[in-house]
């Protein structure tokens, strides 16, 4: 595995983003399609993945990140994130994206989430697989230039 600057931050975002997708899939599978709005989930996903790498960092004195900083992205259940995010377009604009680009990215993410949520609402939160959906959503952000990195290895695009 190749180390790149910001490795710990990217891995934490990957972990938190995947957890977010899994929570949403579980909600739709257990409680049905109306349990969570697609746009609300997409807004949380965008906030997590596009959070600046300096987002509320904490200094670490030991371990693999000794002397470095790791983000303090709040560890919250998906439901708690819902109260602090705006619309998907608002979340894109937080990263200073122009209106048409923010609308295009938000729309594409919402369309992909809608297809997955329809399937998850049939009762199985792993059809389609959450890690695959997570990678697809991250790739949409990367392909549109909103996310500078992604993929199987640190620093790689999908």
Image (cartoon, grey):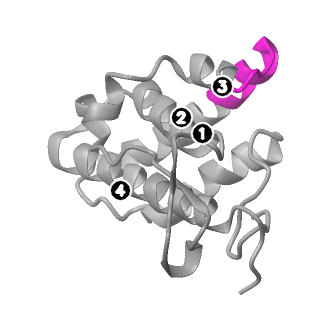
Callout 4: SS:
helix
| 98 inside magenta stretch | yes
- The residue positioned 38% from the left and 43% from the top of the image is 74
Distance between mark 3 and mark 1 Cα atoms: 10 Å
Classed neighbour count for the residue bearing mark 1: other residues with Cα under 10 Å, few (<14), some (14–19), many (≥20): some
Which residues are drawn in magenta? Answer: 95-107
Callout 1: SS:
loop
The residue carrying mark 4 is 22
The quadrant of the picture occupied by the N terminus is bottom right
Classed neighbour count for the residue bearing mark 4: other residues with Cα under 10 Å, few (<14), some (14–19), many (≥20): many
Q: Position of residue 126 (x, y in %)?
A: 35, 65
The residue carrying mark 1 is 51
Q: Is residue 137 visible?
A: yes
Distance between mark 4 and mark 2 Cα atoms: 16 Å
User: In the drawing, what numbered circle is on residue 47?
Assistant: 2
- The residue positioned 80% from the left and 23% from the top of the image is 101
């Amino acid at each position: 595995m190749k180390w790149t600057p910001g490795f710990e931050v990217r891995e934490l975002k990957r972990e938190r983003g995947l957890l977010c997708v899994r929570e949403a899939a579980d909600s739709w599978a257990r409680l049905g399609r109306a349990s969570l709005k697609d746009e609300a989930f997409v807004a949380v996903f965008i906030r997590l993945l596009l959070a600046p790498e300096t987002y509320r960092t904490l200094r670490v004195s030991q371990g693999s990140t000794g002397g470095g900083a790791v983000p303090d992205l709040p560890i919250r259940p998906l439901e708690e994130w819902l109260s602090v995010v705006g619309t998907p377009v608002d979340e894109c604009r937080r990263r200073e994206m122009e209106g048409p680009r923010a609308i295009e990215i938000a729309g594409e993410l919402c369309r992909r989430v809608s297809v997955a949520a329809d399937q998850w609402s049939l009762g199985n939160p792993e059809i389609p697989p959450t890690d695959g959906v997570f990678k697809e959503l991250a790739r949409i952000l990367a392909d549109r230039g909103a996310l500078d990195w992604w993929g199987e290895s640190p620093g790689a695009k999908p």
